[in-house]
Amino acid sequence: MRRIIVPLVLCVMVVAGGASAQERVRAEAGMHPRIAAAVRALEDAIKYMEAAPHDFGGHKAEAIQESKRAIEQLRLALAYRAKQDRIK
């Protein structure tokens, strides 16, 4: 279910605010480069773990799952900031 939330939030933002809503989220990522870098690093780590032939001592599946959840939360944080900046 969490995999659906982030795309759904972004779709709602785009429909409600036009195409510029997605641009605002991108701009917000530019204003918070460490968050954007963290998302990229987590995505890279997920790809690495998924391709790895070993299970990291039994932690691989949970590490992938929790990394995906972290990405979702970071994207939601950026979407929230974009919305708050729009209100001001």
Image (cartoon, helix red, strand yellow):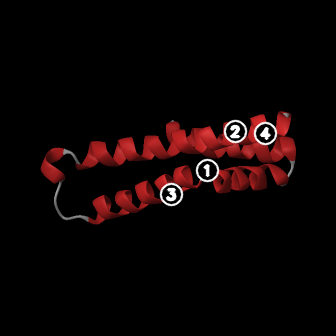
Circle 2 residue: 81
Q: Amino acid at mark 4?
A: Asp
**Mark 4 and mark 1 residues within 8 Å of each other at the beta carbon:** no
Residue 44 in percent (x, y) is at 40, 62
**Mark 1 and mark 2 residues within 8 Å of each other at the beta carbon:** yes
Q: Earlier in the sequence, mark 2 or mark 3?
A: 3
**Mark 2 and mark 4 residues within 8 Å of each other at the beta carbon:** yes
Crowd class of label 1 (few under 14; some 14 to 19; many from 20; radius 10 Å): few
- Residue situated in front as seen by the camera: 80 or 2: 80
Q: Secondary structure at mark 1?
A: loop
Mark on residue 37? 3
- Calculate the distance from the C-alpha at mark 1 to the C-alpha at mark 3: 9 Å
Circle 1 residue: 32
Q: Amino acid at mark 2?
A: Arg
Q: Secondary structure at mark 3?
A: helix
Mark on residue 85? 4
Q: Secondary structure at mark 2?
A: helix
